[in-house]
Image (spheres, rainbow, N blue to C red):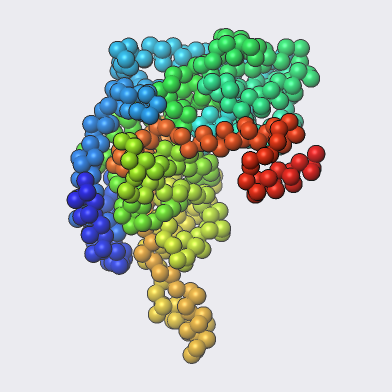
Amino acid sequence: MTTLWQALENHHEQVRDRALLPLLEDPLRGSEFSARHGGLLFDFSKTNIDATGLSLLLQLIDGAGVEARREAMFTGATINETEGRAVLHTALRNPDDAVMVAGQDVMPGVRDTLARMRGFADDIRSGRIRGQGGAYTDVVNIGIGGSDLGPAMAAIALSPYADGPRTHFVSNVDGAHIADTLRGLDPATTLVIVASKTFTTIETMTNAETARDWMAASVADPAAQFAALSTAAERTAEFGIDPSRVFGFEDWVGGRYSVWGPIGLSLMIAIGPADFDDFLAGGADMDRHFRQAAPAHNLPMLLALVGIWHNQICGHATRAVLPYDQRLSRLPAYLQQLEMESNGKRVAMDGSDLTLHSGPVVWGEPGTNGQHAFYQLIHQGTRIVPCEFILVRKGHEPHLRHQHRLLVSNCLAQSEALMKGRPLAEAMEIMAAKGLTGAEQDRQARHRVFPGNRPSTTLAIPKLTPFTLGQILALYEHRVFVEGVILGINSFDQWGVELGKELALALQPILEGRASAEGKDSSTTMLLDYLRAVD
C-alpha cells in the first residue's frame, strides 16, 4: 500500500494545477466518469481525477482488501474488533438470506421484531391502540445521536408519505428542547417513544423523566403512553413500560446505523409499515449492488475513492454536502455523524498511529439556502471545499414544477461555476461594459474573478421516495465502510465520545454545590464560578 499511496501522491503532483474545464471538453468525459444504478446517477466528472488517477484509486480496493472485508461484514464476522462485535445493520433490511453470528441465524429474531413493529404501528395508526384521551395524534421520539438523527432526518425526507400521527423529536438535554416540543401537545393523545439501548443514556433518560412528569399531570397512568426501543428489559419495566411496547435490538447494530430497525419505529408510525418496507427494500437494493458490482461501477466504492482522493491525496480537509431538496435538509447532519463518528479516528486497527489524515469535516445545508450563506467561501475562498451536490429529477408538487426547475437549474449552475470559474479577462470585460476603465476597472474586476477548478460531484435521484431514500442512506453507509477499510481503521466504534461524558458526570455535582472544584484547571474553575453565581 505504501507504494500505491506514493504513486497517487506523485500523480497528484503532476495534475494538481491542471484546469478542469479542458477535461470537460471531452464529450465522453461525463459518461466515463460517472456510474449508475437503479435510477441513481453519480457524476464525478467535475473532479481532477483522470483515467490514470482512477486506475490507481481502484487499486486501493484490492490493496486494502475491501472486498474480503465487505464479505466479512455481511456474513457476521467480528469486524468491530475493539468492541468484539459483528456489524450487521444490513441484516435489518435483509429480505431473505440467513445471516449467521456465532453459529446462529439472526434473521428469525430480526423478522419477529419487524413483525411486532408493524403490528404496533398499524394499531397506533388505526386507533386500535389509543391514548387515555382517544386516538393518538402525536408521537414524540426521545433519543440522541443515532437514536434521533436517522428517524428525524427520514421523517422530514418522507413527509409526503406521512399520513399517521404527527412526529416530533427530542434529543438535546437542554430543557428548552423538550419544553418547546411538548408545548401545545395533548398529553392524553401523545405517545412517547424512548430510544436508548441501555436505558441509561443521561440525555435521553433525563428527557424521558421530564416527559413522564408532564404526562402525569394530565393522565391517570402516564407510563401507559410510553414505548421503548431498548434491550434493557429490567429498566424499561422499572420505568413502567409494558413489555409488549418494548422493541429491542442486538449489539451488532451501531447507533448511527440503526434507523432500519426499532429505532425507526416513529418513522414507521408516520409513514406506515408498507412504505417503511419500501425504505428497507431500497437499502437492501444498495446492499446487493455493493456486493455484486465491479469496483469501477460500484457506487459506494466510487464515492469512497473520490473522497479519498480529495481528503488524503489532495489534502482538502472538509467536504460540503449540498442537497437541492428541502426535505433532505437534515441529511448533512445525519451524514456528519455517520462519517465523522465512524472515520474520525487517529489510531489504526492494529493500534498504530495513522500515517494519513482520517475522515474530513462533513457539513452542509440545502440549496438554494446555502448559496446565500457560505457559497461565497466555496467559490472565492482560499481553501478548496469539495462539494457533493444531491439533486432530485422529479418533485412531489406537480403544480410547482417551475420552482423545481429553478431549483435544479441552480444546482447545475453551481457545479458548473465551481468548475469553470470566471477569469480576470472576462471580469475586465464586464467592468468595461459598466463604463469602468484603468485602475478602477482592474480593481473592481479582481473582486469578480472566480478561480474555478473547484471539484464537485453530483448524485442525482429520480424522485425522493422511501425506496430511493433507503438507497441513498445505504450508499453512504457503505461509502464510509470502504473509506475506513482503505484507511485501516475501525469505522464502527466511537471512543471519542466517552471522555467528555465522564467529565460531565464529575462536573454536575460541582455545579450543584455538592462537590469541590479542587484539582480543576483555572479556566474550568473560572467558568464554574461564573455559572454557580447564577443560582
Q: Where is residue 96 in the image (x, y as percent from the top left)?
A: 32, 17
Q: Where is residue 69 in the image (x, y as percent from the top left)?
A: 26, 31
Taking depth in this image into account, of 255 and 44 the one nearest to the observer is: 255
Q: In this view, does 376 lie to the left or right of 533?
A: left
Q: Position of residue 159 (x, y in %)?
A: 55, 34
Q: Which residue is drawn at 43% across and 57% down?
A: 385
Q: Residue furthest bottom?
A: 438
Q: Residue at x 42, y 42 (%)?
A: 344
Q: In this view, does 82 lie to the left or right of 439?
A: left
Q: Which residue is drawn at 38% across and 11% down?
A: 108
Quarter-of-image position of residue 9: bottom left
Q: Where is residue 484 in the image (x, y as percent from the top left)?
A: 34, 39
In the rendered image, is residue 66 in sight?
yes
Taking depth in this image into account, of 346 and 487 the one nearest to the observer is: 346
Taking depth in this image into account, of 453 and 275 the one nearest to the observer is: 453
Quarter-of-image position of residue 189: top right
Q: Which residue is drawn at 47% across and 65% down?
A: 381
Q: Is residue 302 left or right of residue 448?
A: left
In the rendered image, is residue 275 in sight?
no
Q: In this view, does 441 lie to the left or right of 202?
A: left
